[in-house]
Amino acid sequence: MRVLRDFWKNKAFLLMVLPGALWLILFFYVPVTGNIVAFKNFKYSDGGFFKSLMDSPWVGFDNFKFLFTSNNAYLITRNTVLYNFAFIVLGTIFAVFIAIVLSEIRSRKMKKIYQTSMLFPYFLSWVIISYFVYAFLSPDKGLLNSIIGAFGGENVNWYNEPKYWPFILIFLGIWKGVGYNSIIYFASILGINSTYYEAAMVDGASKWQQIKNVTIPQLVPLISILSILAVGNIFRADFGLFYQIPRNSGALYEVTSVLDTYIYNGLTSTGDIGMTAAAGLYQSVVGCILVVGVNLFMRKFDEESALF
Amino acid sequence: MRRLKKLTIGLVGILVLSLLMAGCGSLSGNASKNTDSKKGVTTLLMYQIGDKPENYDQLMDAANKIVEKKIGARINLQYIGWGDYDKKMSVIVSSGENYDIAYANNYVANAQKGAYADLTDLAPKYAKEAYDMLDPAYIEGNKIKGKLYAFPVNGNVYAQQMLTFNKQYLDKYHLDISNVNSYADLEPLLKVIKKNEKTVMPIAAGQGFHVESDMDYPLSNGMPFAVDLKGDHTKIINQYDNERMKQDLRTMHKYYQEGYIAKDAATSNTDYPLDGNTWFVRQETQGPYDYGDTLLTTTAGQPLVSRPLTDAYKTTGQAQMANFVVSSNSKHKEKAVEFLGLLNSDPDLLNGLIYGEEGKAWKKVGDNKVKLLDGYKANNHMAAWNTGNNKIVYVQDSITDQQIKERDENIKNAKQSPILGFNFNTDSVKTEITNISNVMSQYLDGLNTGTLDPDKAIPEMDAKLKKAGYDKVLKEMQKQFDEFRASKE
Amino acid sequence: MKGGEKQMSKKKISQVRVQSFGKKSDIIFNILVALLAFSCIFPFIFVIIISFTSEQSLLVHGYALFPKEWSLKGYTYLADLKGQILQSLFITVFVTVIGTLINVTFTSTYAYAIARPNFKYRRFFTIFALITMLFSPGMVPSYIVMTTLLHLKDTVWALILPMALSPFNIIVMRTFFKRTVPESIIESARIDGASEFRTFTKIVLPLAVPGIATISLFAALGYWNDWFNALLYIQSDNLVPLQFLLMKIQSNIDYMTQNASLSANLSGGMASIPKEATRMAMVVISTLPIACSYPFFQRYFVSGLTIGGVKE
C-alpha cells in the first residue's frame, strides 16, 4: 500500500524516466544476459542463440585464462592502465584549460573559428589519422625525416624505435579528443552565474584570481564526475589508437601492446565468442570495482562531486 | 524558451530542406522487393560475399526464372561487402537467425560447433549431378570428423605460388626468367631494376606478404604449424625452424638491406596495382582455371609472365576456398541443396550469372566457348570463383582446346597435400592458440618482408612461442594428425 | 560584435561579458589557441590535398603538401555513385535529426528526474543508468533484440533506436541541472502550483539550454559518425547511411590490398580505382557537411549559452 502511494506521489518523475528506463532494459539489461557465454563453451543447437547458450556446457573460468597466462600479461595491463591514466589526467587538464581560454577570449568570431577547428580531429577516424601520421613518420618518404635530413641529422626509423611512442600516442590521444571534451567544460563555464564574477570584480580580483577562485571551483564537480566515469574504462584502451597508429609494428610491441590489441590479435584467428565476452567482462568488472572505490573516496570529500 | 523553439524550428528546417534536396529519398528498405513469395514457391535466403552487381535485378530475374521452372524455388540473394562479411556473418550465425544458404566464413570452427547442416547424405541425394562433378579432393578437404558440411565451388582445386613479372621491364632490359625458380634466383634481375628504374619497387611486398616454401598449413599460413611437403609428411613442424624456409628468409633479409623491398614494408599497406608499372615482381596464386597467365594478363590489362615458386598441391585451403553452407536452422534444407545442385550443374543458369545477359554481354561460339561483346562490363556479372562449378563455365574464345586439355590433365596429375582433410580441433588449446597468435603478430610481417634478420629474430620468437604454450599445441596437433592419418589408411 | 552588444544592452539584459581577458593576455592566448586550432585543422587540409593528388605521384613521392601531379580521379569514382551518395546523405541527415530529437528528449527528462532531490527513487535510477556504462551487452544478443524481438532489421529505426539514449549524456545533463538551475526557482514554481512537467518545460529547460545544446551536439555527432549499426542491421541499398557507404568502399579497398596475391580473382571493377585519393575524397565528402553545419549549430549553442548564464 505504501509502495503504491509512493509511486503515485512520484508519478511525474517516474513518467519522465519511463522512456529512458524502457530503453535501458531493452537495449542493455536484456542483451547483457548474453555475457553468460563467457563461462560456456558455446555450441549451436536448434532454436537460436539463447537456446544454444543454455545447452552449451559450463567451463568455469576457462575462457578467461588467455588474459592471464600470456607472458605479456603484466606488460599489457601496465600499458593499458598507464596510458589511460595519462589520458584522464592530461586530457582533463588540457580540456579545462582550453575551455577556460576560449571562454575568456574577446573576439566572439575567433572563438567560433577555434572551436570549430578543434572539433575536426574528432571526425577523422584513426585509420585516416594513421595515414597522416605515416606521412610524417615514414622512414623514407616522411616529412619529419626530410626535415631532420635538411638539418644534417640522421634519419630515424620511427616505427622501430619504441622510445618515442609513448609520447606520440599520448599526444595523439589528447589531440584527437580535446576539442570534443572541452565543449562540456566550455558550456559549463558559460553556465556559471555571472554574479559570481561581478562579486569577484568588486573585490578587485585579477583575471587569474577569478579563474582560480570562481571558474575552477565551479567546474570541480563536473571534472570529478567525468573522471570517475573515465576510471570505469581504465582497462579499455582505444583500439584504433594503439593498433592503427603504430601500424601493428612488431618492434614497438613493448610500448604499444594494450589489452584491446592483445585481444584482437589473439582472437581474430579463432573468433571465439566465449573468449571475446570473457575479455569484455574482465574489463568491465575491474572498471566497476574501481568506479565504486573512487566514488566512495570522493563522497568523503564532497557529496556533489561524487557520481552516486 | 524562445531559443529552444528556434532550435527546434532550425532542426526541422534542416530536415525539410534535406527532404526536398533528396527529392525522392525513401525510407523503406528495398532489399527484398522482388522476391515476394508466391504460392507453392519456396524463397531461399542466400548470403553472398562481395559487391552487388549493378544489374543485380536483371541477373536475378533471369536466374529465378530458371530456378523456379526447374525446382520450384526462388532465390533471395543478399550481398554483404568484402570487408564486412566476416563480422556480419558471424553475428548472423551466432544469433541463430534464419537463412538458407551462405558463403562460408570461418568454415571449420562453425562446422565444428554445429552451425551448418550436415550435407553428407543430402548432397549426393539432392545434388547428384553437381556432386559427382566435384574433384574428390573437395569432398575430402571439407570433411570434418567424417561429415561434409559444405558444397564447395569446383574450381582451382590445386594452387601454386608464382612469381609474376611485369613484362614491360623484362623486355626493356632483355631479362631472362627461364631459370628463376626461387627467391634467390631473382637477385641479378632485381639489381638491374634497382639500378635503372628509380620509381619502380623491385619486389612488391607489404604487410601480409608471405614467403612461400612448399609448406602446407593446418591452421593458416600465419601460424607456426606446417607440414613440409618436401620433407617428412607425417610430422607437424614450425616452418620457421625449417632450414629451407630460413634460407629464403635470409634471402629476403638481404634483399631488404639492398633496397629491393620497401624500407617500410613491414608496416606499409601500399598497394601496387596489378595494372600499374610501379612494381617489377610480385607473388600471385594460380590454379588450373587461370589458364597460365591468361586470366592475370586480362585483369591487369598488360602482359604479365609468371614462374612457379612452389609445386602444385591440392590443399585443404584450396578445397575450402569458396564453400557454400546450409544453415542448421534452415527450414528448407533439401530445397537449398537442390538449388546448389542446380547452380553447379546447369550451364544456362550459371553462365547467365557469370557473364551477364546472353546476346548483350556475350554470345556462345562453339560448344563451351563464349565471345564477349561490347555489353560486357566490369560490374555487370558475378565472379566465377565464388559462384559455381567452374567446369561448366564457358571459357573465353581466346583459350584453345589444347589449354583446356592441359587444364584437365594438370588437375588429374596434381599431388595431394598430406594434410588434405585434416581439420584441427582447437577446443582443448584455445588459450594457447590465442597467445601464439599474439606472438606471431609481433614477428610475422617483420620476418616475411625481410625487415628482421631471421638468425636473430627466430630464436627470440621461438623462446616466446615456448612460453606461450607452443609445445602443448604441437603435441595435441600431432596427436590429432596421427589419428587422422590412421583413419585414412 | 560591438554592435551586437549594444543591441543586447538595449534589451536590458545584462549582457556584459565580465569574463574576458585583458588586451595583452588576449593576444598571447589567441596565438596559443590559434596554433592548436591550426594543428587540428591541418590534417584535414592535408587530406583534401591528398584527395586531389594523382596516384602515381603518391606512390613515387609519397604524401606531399605540394604534389607534383594533381588529379580529380578520386572524385570521379565517387561521382559515379552520385545517386547512392545523395540517398545516403538523406538517410544520414534524417537519422541524425530525428535521432537527436529523440535522444535529447529521453536523456533530458531522465536526467532531470534523477537530479531532483524530491524524487524518491533517484538513486536507484542513477545506478540503473550508470551500470550500463561499465558493462557492454555484446553484439549478438543486441542483434537478436533488434531483429527477433523488435523486428526492426533493415529499417531506419535500427539506425535510430540503438543510440536513442546515452547514459553518458544523462550523467552530464544531471550535473548541469544540479548546477545551473537553482533549487529556489523550482521551489517557487511549485508554490505557484505548477505541475512538475510544467516546471520542467517552462522554467528548467530554458535555463538549461547550455546543457541541452551540448548533449544535442554530442548526440548529433554520434549519429553522424555511426556506421556500425548500419553494418549490423541494414541490408537495403537505399537505407545505407553515408558513413557506412564510405566505410564499405574503404573496407573493400583494404580487402583487395590485403589479398593482393589473389588479385586476378577478386578485382572485378575495383582494380583501377585510385585507392589513396578515393579514400581521402571519401573523408572529405563525409566530413564536410557536418563540419559546415557545426557553426550553424554553434549560433544557437553560443547565444543560448549567454542567455542561460544570465539571471533574470
Image (cartoon, coloured by chain):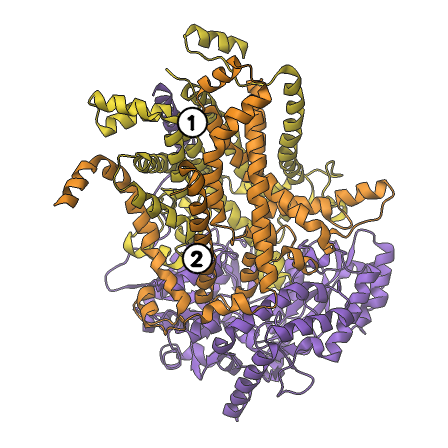
Chain colours: A orange, B purple, C yellow
Residue A240, x across and y down, in percent? 57, 50
Disc 2 residue crowd, few under 14, some 14–19, many 20+, Cα 10 Å: some
* Three-letter residue code for mark 1: Pro
Farthest residue toward the left? A1
Q: In terms of image quadrants, where is residue C8? A: top left
| Residue beneath the point at 54% across and 10% down | C2
Quadrant of the rendering where the C terminus of chain A is positioned: top left
Query: Tag 2, which chain?
Result: A
User: Which residue occupies the foreground of this view, B457 or B228?
Assistant: B457
Residue B376, x across and y down, in percent? 54, 55
Disc 1 residue crowd, few under 14, some 14–19, many 20+, Cα 10 Å: many
Residue B25, x across and y down, in percent? 39, 37
Query: Tag 1, which chain?
Result: C
* Three-letter residue code for mark 2: Val
1 and 2 marks on the same chain: no
Circle number at residue B485: none
Residue at numbered disc 2: A285
Task: Give left or right: position of A151 versus A125.
Answer: right
User: Which residue occupies the foreground of this view, A80 or B397?
Assistant: A80
The answer to whether B52 is drawn above or below residue A184 in the figure is below
Residue at numbered disc 1: C210
Farthest residue toward the bottom? B489
